Amino acid sequence: METVTNKLPNQVEDLLPLKGTDHIEFYVGNAKQSALYYQYCFGFELVAYRGPETGCRDRVSYVLQQDKIRFVLTSSLLTDSEISKHVALHGDGVKVLALWVDDATASYNLTVERGAVSVKAPETTEDEFGTITTASIQTYGETIHTFVERKNYKGAFMPGFEARKSNERIQSIGLKYVDHCVGNVELGDMDRWVKFYQDVLGFKLLITFDDKDISTKYTALMSKVVSNGNGYVKFPINEPAKGIKKSQIEEYIDFYKGAGVQHIAIATDNIIETVGTLRKNGVDFLYVPDNYYSDLLDRVGNIDEEIEDLKKHNILVDRDDEGYLLQIFTKPVQDRPTVFFEIIQRKGAKSFGKGNFKALFEAIEREQAIRGTL
């Protein structure tokens, strides 16, 4: 099978109109400490809080924001709650991929009618800042999509949360918005979940990569990318493919104990400055050998950046018909080798860095070998 790319037309009538990613909620073992990590390492500012001090007796949540990106970090105050069980099974991980919509009730009703499994029926909450309506459906693993309707709300985040500020001045590192979120699913489940997004949410198949596209000497995987009509929300779905050794997808599923969000790609307008600051702040990235850069210009053509700057920070480059992109991947941001981040800068390119797959996956395999899981 060859790589298939279906370009979305500029104007697509969405079955399910989405305005973008509203927020991403992580269930974590210690939300207070995780919040400090994302503030001081990734440049997110604390904007809202929920916990015992606000009348919430079973959990605490810290809402962090940088430009258009919102992370919600939630920990349980109970030992036998859904949150505690989620963290015990999966470790720190993404529970909610929340979608920003104009009408949460209509979005929920439409998707449930088309086959989605309901997690939470529409609910409207209010405080002095207005009202918010939310509703949730199930997707792969224990991950859920929550539709968030906030057009009648002016508060920091949602009713039940209080506005908060970071204790120290936090300097943004230039992260702008969520470019895409990648899910890992078990062998044989990729097409099922691609069909779910097509049939239930009205997404379009954007790109297909097979095991010839995404493989090394030892491992392989397959991936399909689905996108909503306006392109604001893109979800690559990965599954393992047959290889000589254990692939990164199999390692993820072994440690996460099932399907889940593998990585979140975040856009920046200056990847060299952003990555340089992340490194100074203590964030670890995958290593790419210097020989990757020896023929870089022959492979991708002229670029604006200096090769030495890219080599210094291990930043990868790829080109498509629309332009080029620069990307780099962190190491996992928790002890289990599961969730990590991609930092991406697009200079016209609409693709996902196919030309970097081999270098990227060899870098991941080096880390697997160190962990003894390759």
Image (spheres, grey):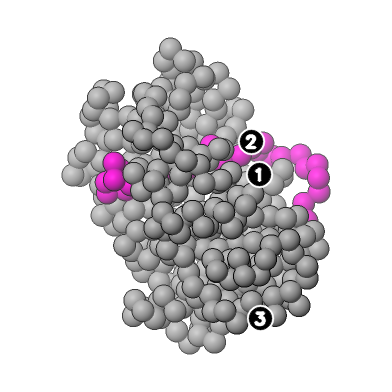
Residue hosting label 3: 294
Residue 244 placed where, x, y %? Answer: 48, 87
Residue 364 as seen in the image, left or right of residue 195: left
Residue at 51% x, 19% y is 154
Image coordinates of residue 308 in percent, x first then y, are 62, 70
Span of residues in magenta: 5-34
The three-letter amino acid code for the residue at tag 3 is Ser
Q: Quadrant of the N terminus?
A: bottom right
Residue 302 placement (x, y as % from top left): 78, 67
In the visual, does 333 lie left or right of 357? left
Q: Do the residues labelled 3 and 1 touch (CB within 8 Å)?
A: no
Q: Is residue 187 visible?
A: no
Residue 274 is one of the magenta-drawn residues: no
Sooner in the amino-acid sequence: mark 2 or mark 1: 2
Residue most toward the left? 79
Q: Are marks 2 and 1 in contact (CB under 8 Å)?
A: yes
